[in-house]
Amino acid sequence: MRWIVSRLAFQFPVGRSEIAFCDCMLVFIVLYEEFASPRAEMSCGHAVTPMSLTNWCRRLLEEGKSKFVCGQPNCNKEWPYVEVRKMALLTPEEREYFESTMAQNAAREYFNSKTCPGCKFSVTRKDESNLSVRCQICTERKGKPYEFCWQCLKEWKGPQPRSDRCDNDGCYNEPLKALKTCPEIVFESIKDVRGCPSIRACPTCGSLLEHTSKKCKNLVCPRCRVEFCFVCLKLTFQCLRTSRHYIPCSDGVAPRQTSIPVWHQNT
């Protein structure tokens, strides 16, 4: 049974008495026997409920993605945000969260750069194991190599390459400080896990992640998309060989990290 509606109030006759309004042309598919809520037909041809669509897209955002794609096998068609917003019937609060998170994820993915202190232009670091970054614009302008510190954003001082700091006063590794001083986490759904830091560096790319203490112990890094265990720091598939999502790891809690892993994207 198909209903096509436009700016009309419609009632869902599936054992419920809900009224909804629509501001665009939607196609709702109501199946009396299988589903307790209406399903919206997306542009790719697959049908979803507003709630399942919202949850799926929220999951994509939490994984660091900035675009929405269909989750059906062998589809992966991209859905425009305008379509998602209308089909999911997002509230103003949900719209604000979706739009701000999309912008943050896009910036993290496409604009991994910093401003050169010399010329104020954006510079991208090629070697993530070296804090000394050469600015080509300043090098050409000055007629000699110009390097600045990726960490403190001052002109480089001292020997190089270095991965910890330069010789400028006040240059220190904030991520390492966070790993060292962050409080311990108390998981809501996992018992008998003690001494686990609330902030971890992703074992693949080094991005700092903070666990919310809710749900399971595994996280998907928004940057590299690799899933790992927040407790033992193994990749999830390795941890699950001897453990489960909601029970302590067989190897216990990994100690606080004292270095930031470097992401070798081409290996």
Image (cartoon, rainbow, N blue to C red):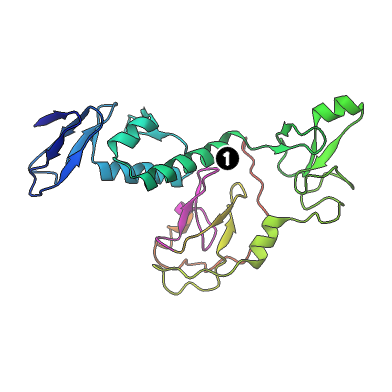
Which residue is at the front of the view, 130 or 208? 208
Which residue is at the front of the view, 225 or 106? 106
Q: How many marks?
A: 1
Range of magenta residues: 214-237
Which residue is at the front of the view, 244 or 12? 12
In this view, 208 is above or below 7: below
Q: Position of residue 193 (x, y in %)?
A: 48, 72
Q: Residue 258: tell me if it is visible.
A: no
Q: Residue 66: tell me if it is visible.
A: yes
For disc 1, the marked residue is 108
On-image quarter of the C terminus: top right
In this view, 224 is above or below 211: above
In this view, 219 is above or below 2: below
On-image quarter of the N terminus: top left
Three-letter code, disc 1: Arg
Quarter of the rendering containing residue 161: top right
218 magenta-colored: yes
